[in-house]
Image (spheres, rainbow, N blue to C red):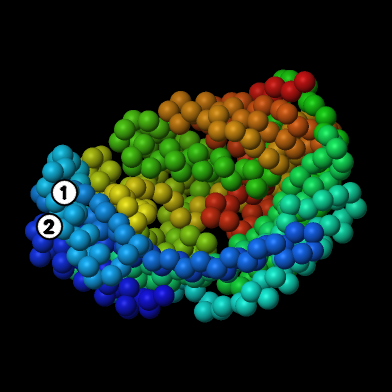
Amino acid sequence: MLTITQAEDRVSTLIAAARKAGADAADALYVCDASTQVSVRLGQLEDVERSEGEDIGLRVFVGRRSASVSSSDLSADALAALVERAVAMAREAPEDPWAGLAPADRLLTGAAPDLEADDGADPAPAALRERALAAEDAARAIAGVTNSEGASASAGRSVIALATSHGFARGYSTTGYSSSASVIAGEGLGMQRDYAYHSTRHFADLEAADAIGRRAGERAVARLNPGRLASGAMPVLFDPRAGASLLGHFAGAITGAAVARRTSFLLDKMGEAVFAPGIVVRDDPHRVRGLRSKPFDGEGLPTAPADLIADGVLTGWLLDSASARQLGLAPTGHAVRGIGGAPGAGATNLHLAAGALSPADLMGDVKLGLYVTELIGQGVNPVTGDYSRGASGFVIRDGRLAEPVAEITIAGNLIDMFRRLTPASDLEFRRGVDVPTIRVEGMTIAGA
């Protein structure tokens, strides 16, 4: 694996070669990933995987024409051929009036924030194996658990570097660790499965393996013998694991590409109340040890925390340079990209701010409702906001969680759901998208 400095030199050299070959402008991205994963099942080692790979992507511009190419072969001959092919492709590509690099005067300069994204640890496979075994043992120890789908623990490190032809060349590294368990409860046709996991940037921050395992086992057992729920309109509460998807739909609707194509259900909602008063949705790329924290975006622009929803009001879009030009706006530092192709836009560490009520208080006045722990299917229309998904969870009866239920469909419209949304006080930062328990009034339930 290259050092950050070596990675910066590699992409800078590629940019120089592209300019020499006739490109008017170019950018290049280098990514190296190395990871180890250990999997166990029923107390036995099942798999040990070690992978390491390097990839480099080059995007070149000839006027308003552009092309992108990538390679996992980083030899001198392969990179020389990569440059020649990219420039030749760009000369034959159609013109795009919005294409181009990010504005030079908006690129990151000066020191980058210290995000503590790389802890420098390198746990041995034996340590990962012990963690995976501990998680599975704790899950299988829960009364009612009858089988295991396995447990795993992993460790990885990445080096990312970006260079552009107007002088930007920066890189950074990240580490990532995870632990998970998935088990089955019950017998025969009555079996139920569930899982638990935790991911962190620092190995020391990983939740105890036995706690992860116990949670997986308890969740599976709690789902046994599910019933059905009568159809009707009622309050629906989403646990944090399921509720995070609602913010995912929101983030997708405010990306520049969706707005420019007029395929967003939040089109023309800029500056309007989209959520209830007091609601805050924040994107924070500078969260220390955050799973999606980064000092600059996919085009070299500095990242910065931003309230995308402030007091219920939509404050802005997530814009890369191309969509910003199309909309007549400035890029926002939210460009995301892979090795190949042009950048798009997306959020980083996104969260819905906590409310004042505990989850118990939030459901305390519900006579009959649904507490959703799992969502199934993709029945969401990004243009209209119409929402219909399969769900399972628990009945809320007289303000308390009651029996498990499954094979239910919940439906509504995201615009109405956002306005009727109330967050609880139990926000924890555990994922790339985090929410507390969420209550949404008046959703339509199709049950028995």
Please state, as top left, top right, bottom left or bottom right, where the C terminus lies in the image. top right
Give the amino acid at mark 2: Ala
Q: Which mark is residue 23?
A: 2
Q: Secondary structure at mark 1?
A: helix
- Residues 105 and 229: in front is 229
Upstream in the sequence, badge 2 or badge 1? 2
Q: Is residue 203 visible?
A: yes
- Residues 440 and 321: in front is 321
Pointer 2 and pointer 1: residues touching (CB < 8 Å)? Answer: yes
- Residues 118 and 239: in front is 118
Snapshot quadrant of residue 295? bottom left
Q: Position of residue 138 (x, y in %)?
A: 82, 62
| Inter-mark Cα distance, 2 to 1 | 9 Å
Q: Is residue 109 visible?
A: no
Q: Position of residue 177 (x, y in %)?
A: 59, 67
Task: Determine the residue positioned at 79% across, 59% down.
Answer: 42
Task: Determine the residue positioned at 67% across, 71% down.
Answer: 128
Q: Position of residue 394 (x, y in %)?
A: 78, 37
Vertical placement of residue 437 versus 388, above or below: below
Mark 1 highlights which residue?
90
